[in-house]
Image (spheres, rainbow, N blue to C red):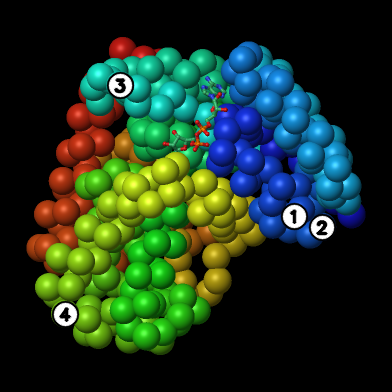
Amino acid sequence: MKAPVRVTVTGAAGQIGYALLFRIASGDMLGADQPVILQLLDITPAMEALEGVRMELDDCAFPLLAGITCSDDPDIAFKDSDYALLVGARPRGPGMERKDLLEANAAIFSVQGKAINNHASRNIKVLVVGNPANTNALITQRNAPDIDPRNFTAMTRLDHNRAMSQLAQKTGTTVNDVTNMTIWGNHSATQYPDLFNAKVQGKTATDLIEQSWYEEDFIPTVQQRGAAIIKARGASSAASAANAAIDHMNSWALGTPEGDWVSMGIYSDGSYGIAEGLIYSFPCTCSDGDWQIVQGVSIGEFSQTKMTASETELTEERDAVAHLLG
Ligand code: NAX
């Protein structure tokens, strides 16, 4: 058995946390041979609820769970952390403008970035789930200057998985037949799910569906799926978001299958003309615990317009929180 690794989860007392922690502890994220120590962070008023989650984790008697700490102090929760899933965020309150939301979250993620910089493993892999995920990841990264910017990522895997299911259902196949899906850009309504490069049983997806379905049905369905779930369930997606976080970390740590790729919000190196330093979702392959942007994906005019619109939105978000970027 390997030595345990430390996994920090923030917002651990929330609904995504509840769907996430048990799967990390059972080995779904890092494999059945990798023990984990969970370092759970939430805010002070949530400590009692978090204690209840800890009791339930204990009661599962997970063989891979080598320890649990609960804290409201980021300096403790990020100590020597090898993996961090930043789920806790400030939700949009009544009357709150988008700028207020960005600012409230920027304050949280700048504190956590500093705690990571000061206390975490130098090789920590960070996934930001809490919204606005890409910009929160940017703020975290910029406040952790001693850590490689490649180690900070944002989650677009839920959008990726949603797009795979929608395409499989439309083409009468299963998700096992769908490969090479890409979500470009921001985890927001400007995200662009790309079917020109996606494949179904090895065939180009856009050859199998009508352009009108793609533009009028598929793209809005994927972009608005979160809102549809809130409307139906009366609460935002939790189990599927937790599942996507598990998938993201699993791909990053253990690799992607030959010939396929995944979508990850990562530090742009300028590939595809996207401004360097933005956290932008690209098609990525992973191996040896590292990601690479897939190069040479074909981009037509339709794709380019949508990719640029999402880049513009991310640039505006970045500029709105410029004073907190460290
Ligand atoms: P909940 O409100 O159920 O839980 C959030 C938890 O975070 C609470 O326990 C709260 O006390 C805690 N928290 C707040 N501020 C904190 C801080 N400074 N430090 C530590 N913990 C803190 O929300 P939940 O449904 O779990 O969603 C969490 C976040 O995920 C939200 O920002 C949500 O918008 C985002 N999502 C992101 C998705 C993605 O694809 N990237 C999809 C799902 C989800 O909507």
Q: Are marks 3 and 2 in contact (CB under 8 Å)?
A: no
* Residue holding disc 2: 33
Q: Is residue 127 above or below residue 258?
A: above
> Which quadrant of the figure contains the C terminus?
top left
The amino acid on which the numbered mark 2 sits, given as a three-letter code, is Asp
Q: Earlier in the sequence, mark 4 or mark 1?
A: 1
- Which of the two residues, 156 or 231, is positioned nearer the viewer here? 231
Is residue 87 in sight in this rendering? yes
Q: Is mark 4 within 8 Å of ligand 1?
A: no
Query: Would residue 78 be seen by someone viewing this image from the given angle?
Result: no
Secondary element at tag 1: loop
Which numbered disc flags the more N-terminal residue, 3 or 2?
Answer: 2
User: Which residue does the numbered mark 3 point to in the structure image?
Assistant: 94
On screen, residue 237 versus residue 186, left or right, reads right
- Crowdedness of circle 4 by 10 Å Cα count: few (<14), some, many (20+)? few
Residue count near mark 2 (Cα–Cα under 10 Å), binned few <14, some 14–19, many ≥20: few
The residues tagged by marks 4 and 3 sit, at their Cα atoms, a distance apart of 40 Å
What's under tag 3, amino acid-wise? Pro
Q: Disc 4 designates what residue?
A: 210
Q: Which of the two marks, 4 or 2, is nearer to us in this view?
A: 4
Task: From the top left corner, tell me how far across and down residue 122 is, in percent.
Answer: 64, 31
**SS for dot 2:** loop
Query: Of the residues under marks 3 and 1, which one precedes in the sequence?
Result: 1
| CB contact under 8 Å: marks 3 and 1 | no
- Residue occupying the point 20% across, 66% down: 217
Q: Which element carries disc 3, helix, strand or loop? A: loop
Are circles 2 and 1 on residues that touch, CB within 8 Å?
yes
Foreground mark, 3 or 2, reads 3
Q: Quadrant of residue 31?
A: bottom right
Q: Which of the image's four quarters has the N terminus?
A: bottom right
Task: Report, in whole angstroms, how far the alpha carbon at label 4 lies from the one at label 2.
Answer: 45 Å
